[in-house]
Amino acid sequence: MDYTKLFSLQGKTAVVTGGARGLGQAMAGAFASFGASVALIDMDVELARAAAGEIEREHGVRCAAFRGNVTDEADIGKVMNAVAEQFGSIDILLNNAGILKRGPAEEMSVQDWQAVMDVNLNGVFICSKEAAKHMIRQGGGSIVNIASMSGFIVNTPQLQAAYNTSKAAVVMATKSFASEWAPHGIRVNGIAPGYMKTSMTGPEFEPGGEYYPILQMIPMKRLGNPEELGGLAVFLASDASSYMTGETVVIDGGYTIW
C-alpha cells in the first residue's frame, strides 16, 4: 500500500472558521499543501481574503474567503450553502473560531460568560450541524474541532473559567456528534492545543512577560508553533484516520503529563 495516499486531500473542500489568522490560517495552509481547496470563514473578511490569496499563491489551490458569524445559525447556513455551491462539496470542517475572556469568576459578567460560550461552544454546534447537512447528503466527511488542553485541566495562574468550561464542552460535543453521525460516514475528532505562539500570545511568554514562568512548566520548555498543529489536522481530516472518531488529541509539549 502507498501510505502517502492516505493523507491526500486532493479533490476535497475544507472549510476553516476563524481562518484569517493564527492557528486557523496555519491549518488551512496545511490542508492546501495536501491538495484541498479551502474556504475561510471569518468576521474580518478583508483579512480572510488576504490570507486566502497567500494560500492560493503558495499552494496553487482554490481558496476563497467568506464573511460569517459562527454564532448566527441563519448566517452560517447561508455561508455553508455558498461554499458548497462554489466548490461543489464540503468534505472537511475545521471549527477553529474561538475567544478568551479572563478574570475572576465572581467578577465575570453573565454577558462575558455567554459571549465565550456563544463562540466557543455554540459556534461549534452551529457550524457542525450546517456542514453535516451537506456531508450527510454527500455520504460522509470529517469534522475537526479545536478544543484545548484547558478542556482537561485548569490552567494556573490564568483565571478563565468560562474558556475552560467551553472547551471541556467541545470535547463532549465531539464525542456526541461522532456517535450520531457515524452512520452517515461522518467522523468527528478534536485537537486540544497547549500554549501556542501567536502574534497575540507570544509577547506574554517573552522574558519579563506575565506568563514567561509557565515555560518552565512545559517539559519541552517552549511554546508550540501554529504549523505544528498542521500535521495532526491533516491526519484527522484525511483517510489516514479513517477508523478514528470521537477522540480529542492533546498536543501541548507535555504540559498536561505533570
Image (cartoon, rainbow, N blue to C red):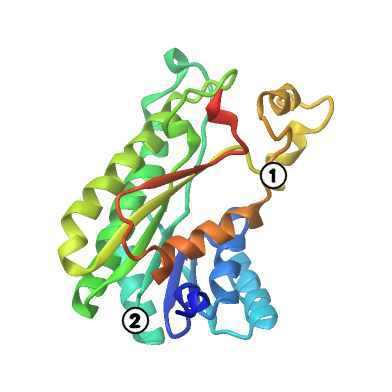
Task: Return the residue nearer the eye: 56 or 215.
Answer: 215
Q: Is residue 42 visible?
A: no
Is disc 1 surrounded by few (<14), some (14 to 19) or many (20+) residues within 10 Å? some
What residue is drawn where x is 32% and y is 37%?
169
The local secondary structure at tag 2 comes to loop
Foreground: 117 or 170? Answer: 170
Residue 127 in sight here: yes
Crowding around mark 2 (Cα neighbors within 10 Å: few <14, some 14 to 19, many 20+) is many
User: Residue 17 location, x and y as percent?
Assistant: 46, 60
The number of numbered discs placed on residues in the rendered structure image is 2
Q: Which residue is mark 2?
A: 89
Task: Provide the residue designation for mark 1.
Answer: 197
**Which residue is at the far front?**
1
In the rendered image of this protein, does residue 5 appear above or below residue 147? below
Of label 2 and label 1, which has the lower sequence position?
2
The image shows residue 109, relative to residue 90, as above or below, that is above
Residue type pointed to by label 2: Ser
Relative height, residue 78 to residue 42 (above, below): below
Q: Quadrant location of residue 127?
A: bottom left
